[in-house]
Image (tube, helix red, strand yellow):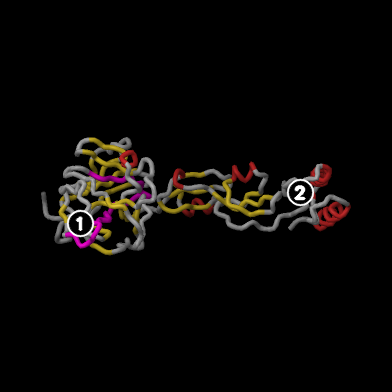
Amino acid sequence: MGAALLALVGQAVLADTDEIIVQNDSFTDGGTVAICPCFAAGEEAAVWLTSPCDGNIVGIQIFWKSILGGAQVTLEDSLIVYEAGNFPNPGAIKDSFDAPVMTDGFLNEFRYQDENQTIPISVPVSAGEEFVLSLKFANSNFTDQFLPSIVSDAQGCQSGKNTVKVNGSTWTDACALGVSGDWVIRAVIECTGEPTGAACLPDGTCAEGLTEADTIALGGFWNGAGTGCGDVLCLGACFIPATEQCVQFDKATCDIVGGVWNGPGSTECPPLCQADVNGDGTLNFFDVSAFLTAFNLNDPVADFNGDKTFNFFDVSAFLQAFSVGCP
């Protein structure tokens, strides 16, 4: 084993403005974590991550904690970057870094391969590439509640994102082992190309691998660098005429309830043209026909004056709105 891989430590270590931190966990500074005193020497805790851009992994972050705090620094085996392979089994090793020094109670960030901080970490990745980032243990903390270990965010274990190399030989889904959240293991990626992510499009569908500029050009809503369609819901403001409510729905649900969808990422429902009863954006005979049908059925759509009765005043209010036209 070579020289120890020293960490920059802090309660919340931040990447530079031109870098992106890629993570599965939802841990924030001061938040709750679950310590896992469940590893033997030679075992690994790993996360499956996706690069948001062409670039290089330039840093690795790991939250390390004991129940009482103040434990001695721990020299573990290595940090390993694998190709994706087939979950839960990673592929070939892309790079590895020996002897990371773990400090209790901190988000440890590793930027260099040597203790003199002269050789920076740099692992090439491409946009949309899935890779696996692992911590290999040199010290056992199995069943010892007072020893420091890797933590999870305790917010629910995401399927296909967290693994454990049990007994140093068999990769297993961490969720199936009862881990309560996502491991707090992160990659810091310096992008050489424009970041891509999931875009919610005007027709309610989701597309992956689009830049923010591409998304805006398509009239969509960008969900951020590194996001995938499996991670997002394409919600927007949906106005439901029957209840006059404005709620957040995806387009399919909005259509089912007879609502008017205002596009992905929208939060407000603009005033509708009430006289456009059939909702086709044009005032013509078909709106008159739709109003008369609704009126005969006592449909709330035809209650134009809002008094919850159906009479001449609703007809008069409709005709007045029809004559004024739509914006």
Callout 2: 10 Å neighbours few (<14), some, many (20+)?
Answer: some
Label 2 sits on a secondary structure element that is helix
Percent position of residue 242, x then y = 71, 49
- Above or below, 316 against 93 in this view is below
Q: Nearer the viewer, residue 108 or 120?
A: 108
**x 76%, y 49%: residue:** 301
71 lies left or right of 311 = left
316 lies left or right of 235 = right
The residue at which mark 1 appears reads as 102
Percent position of residue 256, x then y = 64, 41
Answer yes or no: is residue 82 visible.
yes
Magenta stretch: includes residue 130: no
For the record, the magenta segment spans: 44-71
**x 16%, y 44%: residue:** 41
**x 38%, y 54%: residue:** 26
| Outermost residue to the right | 312
Q: Nearer the viewer, residue 134 or 95?
A: 134
Quarter of the rendering occupied by the C terminus: bottom right
The residue at which mark 2 appears reads as 301
